[in-house]
Image (tube, grey):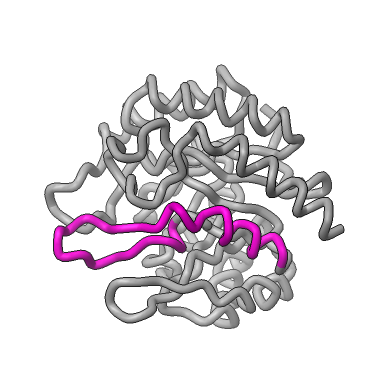
């Protein structure tokens, strides 16, 4: 495949897929549906799914199939469907491993200040998507980009994913999107994670998927270059983040509305 070039010239680019690689069937099915929908609506798609989930609420939560198996499935998506891949890393050692498959190496929000992790991600030469920490100001993300730039890698993108509001909720300060765009890199709104309700007494993160459409529209209205939306055929049965993912059969209608909005904003 050709190297990834982000393109929002038509509408916006979309990073989407199930939160985590659960099995081959769900992963390939979701990727195929998303590919067809994005072709229909003329949207660039990057397929996202984590091969490992290291930051779960509970010790009993699903963390993955195993790195080798999950990366094999992502590689199959890439080769069979010709899709670019985005996946998380959680330690410097993972960067090189993930980069064998991933076109975008993603640094989770909780880890966005970890210098050794950012340096390792930058050294892969791949796009690095740095998610803004729930505890950081938009302006402070400049320092995270400088760590990537120090490796000679200019392929950087930043993602807004909400700010901690009390113990059990997140809010989006939409001023952060234009502020981060001043750094000169594409800025993405992570719609679904911004709607999480963390730290629940059950040990399972909650969410507000009914607000996805409104947050996505607001993100585009303030200039987001791309949207990040996790989706699953049956979110209630998902092994990670089911409470905030968009049901796969709702994606078509949402994209249609968002494309109309983007056209109206131009």
* Residue 193 occupies quadrant: bottom left
* Placement of 206 over or under 88, stated as above or below: below
Q: Residue furthest top?
A: 80
Residue 41: image x %, image y %?
73, 35
Residue 144: image x %, image y %?
54, 72
Residue 200: image x %, image y %?
21, 64
* Placement of 19 over or under 132, stated as above or below: above
Of 137 and 245, nearer the camera is 245
Q: Is residue 228 left or right of residue 28?
A: right
Magenta residue check for 216: yes
* Residue 139 occupies quadrant: bottom right
Marker count (numbered): 0
Does residue 178 appear in the picture of this structure?
A: yes
Residue at 51% over, 24% down:
77
Residue 222: image x %, image y %?
71, 69
The C terminus, quarter of image:
bottom right
The N terminus, quarter of image:
top right
* Placement of 209 over or under 246, stated as above or below: below
Of 170 and 123, nearer the camera is 170
* Placement of 79 over or under 233, stated as above or below: above
Residue at 38% over, 47% down:
94
Does residue 143 appear in the picture of this structure?
A: no
Residue at 28% over, 52% down:
54
Magenta region, residue range:
193-221
Q: Residue furthest right?
A: 266
Residue at 19% over, 47% down:
61
Q: Is residue 220 left or right of residue 81?
A: right
Magenta residue check for 236: no
Of 260 and 44, nearer the camera is 260
Q: Is residue 58 left or right of residue 148?
A: left
């Amino acid at each position: 495949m050709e190297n990834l070039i982000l393109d929002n010239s038509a509408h916006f680019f979309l990073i989407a897929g199930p939160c985590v690689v659960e099995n081959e069937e769900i992963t390939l099915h979701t990727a195929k549906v998303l590919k067809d929908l994005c072709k229909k609506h003329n949207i660039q798609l990057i397929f996202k799914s984590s091969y490992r989930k290291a930051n779960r609420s509970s010790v009993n939560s699903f963390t993955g199939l195993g790195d080798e198996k999950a990366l094999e499935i992502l590689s199959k998506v890439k080769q069979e469907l010709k899709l670019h891949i985005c996946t998380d890393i959680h330690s410097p050692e993972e960067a090189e491993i993930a980069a064998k498959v991933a076109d975008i190496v993603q640094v989770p929000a909780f880890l966005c200040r970890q210098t050794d992790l950012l340096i390792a991600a930058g050294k892969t030469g791949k796009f690095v998507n740095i998610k803004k920490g729930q505890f950081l100001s938009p302006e402070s993300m400049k320092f995270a980009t400088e760590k990537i730039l120090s490796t000679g890698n200019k392929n950087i993108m930043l993602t807004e994913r909400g700010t901690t509001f009390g113990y059990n909720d997140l809010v989006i300060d939409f001023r952060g999107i234009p502020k981060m765009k001043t750094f000169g890199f594409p800025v993405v709104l992570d719609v679904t994670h911004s709607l999480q309700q963390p730290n629940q007494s059950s040990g399972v993160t909650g969410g507000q998927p009914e607000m996805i459409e409104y947050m996505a529209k607001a993100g585009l209205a303030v200039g987001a270059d791309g949207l990040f939306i996790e989706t699953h055929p049956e979110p209630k049965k998902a092994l990670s983040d089911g409470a905030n993912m968009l049901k796969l059969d709702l994606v078509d209608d949402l994209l249609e509305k968002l494309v109309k909005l983007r056209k109206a904003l131009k």
